Amino acid sequence: MQHDARLKIQPLSRIGLNTKEKVAMKSILELRDARNELDREEIHWFLDQLLDLRKLSDPKNCDDPATLPFGELTGKNATAEWAVFMARRILIAAAGWAINHKIGRALPSADAASADDHEHEIAGNAEASIFTGTIRDQSRALADRAVARALLDTSVFPPGLASNLKAAMRALDFGEVWPIVSPENIGLHGSSYTLAQYKLVAVEYVNFLVGQGVRKKAAEERVANIFGVSSVTLKTWGSRDLLRFFKGEAISEITQTARAAGKLWAVKQDDPDYAKRSKGRGETIPGDLYLVWKRFEDNLINLIALEYKETLRKDKARSEHRDPDAN
């Protein structure tokens, strides 16, 4: 198969692979895309790449894993991330329909249909198409745990861990908390991790705006105003608060991706036909950048800020209920 040397693999994991090959299954990013058209030859080609990398990375064949080369990647960790990313894409392309079927079978509405009914795949695809970000509606927790349990069977977990987590999530449905899902007592109170997620999104949005050409100070003031805090407070989120919950390199990766997404968003605004196949364009929009676009489309940042404020309000109310003399 001939591969277009002008295009590059652009993995969601943002590991920087820059080989001179075709974009992998560009029409299949997530489970919602499982029935999109695919190219069998392309999938076979990427599977061959995975098998070649499997051989190259074998400790018996690789004396120095830090210098393991693959395309323009170097090192076993970076190549391992690419391999897992690509294996996931191949799994979705080849068997995403089956995973959607299992999701549909796990939903509360599944009992009304035969196990072989196409409705399960359709319902699973609809479920997989819902994008809510990390913070999900609490009323969905029971169904979400059922779906997660069903997918544990298709995930690559050590067998003992998978079965333990599956049972632990089921126990939660009956009010029992197993150690694997029990919170750690590290001196934090209230919805500290939930609030950290919202703060991370705020910092990400600042960088999304900066990528579009907005000056950083103006972007910080704009986002601070949306979240109802001062720009000084917003700065401390990225420089101090978030480091208690996330590694610095992970935060840096998110902010860099947000800037790249903002930069490409500006390109798209200036050139609406950019990456449109119907217009005969050959560009592609990397999946990780596209997900940033989706997260911030239709002014969703305002809704996220409202959820942040509501979480703060509830935490304060709970605190005052526990200690009415705190004020």
Image (spheres, grey):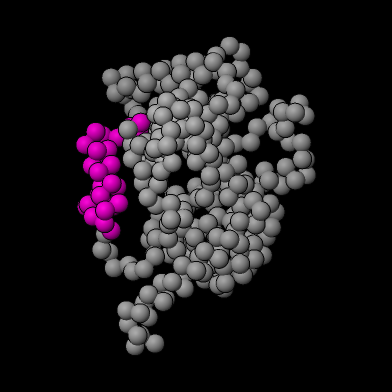
Stretch in magenta: 154-183
Q: Is residue 176 magenta?
A: yes
Q: Quick check: 199 left or right of 326?
A: right
The answer to whether any part of residue 255 appears in the image is: yes
Q: Is residue 85 magenta?
A: no
Identify which residue, 305 or 221, lies in the foreground.
305
Q: Tell me the quarter of the picture where residue 216 sits.
A: bottom right
Q: Quick check: 118 left or right of 76?
A: right
Q: Residue at x 27, y 64 (%)?
A: 186
Q: Residue at x 77, y 40 (%)?
A: 272
Q: Residue at x 51, y 19 (%)?
A: 43
Q: Residue at x 26, y 56 (%)?
A: 175
Horizontal and vertical percent position of residue 9: 56, 28
The answer to whether any part of residue 217 appears in the image is: no
- Residue most extreme to the front: 112
Horizontal and vertical percent position of residue 208: 62, 53
Horizontal and vertical percent position of residue 198: 49, 60
Q: Tell me the quarter of the picture where residue 78 sits.
A: top left
- Residue most extreme to the top: 1
Horizontal and vertical percent position of residue 177: 24, 55
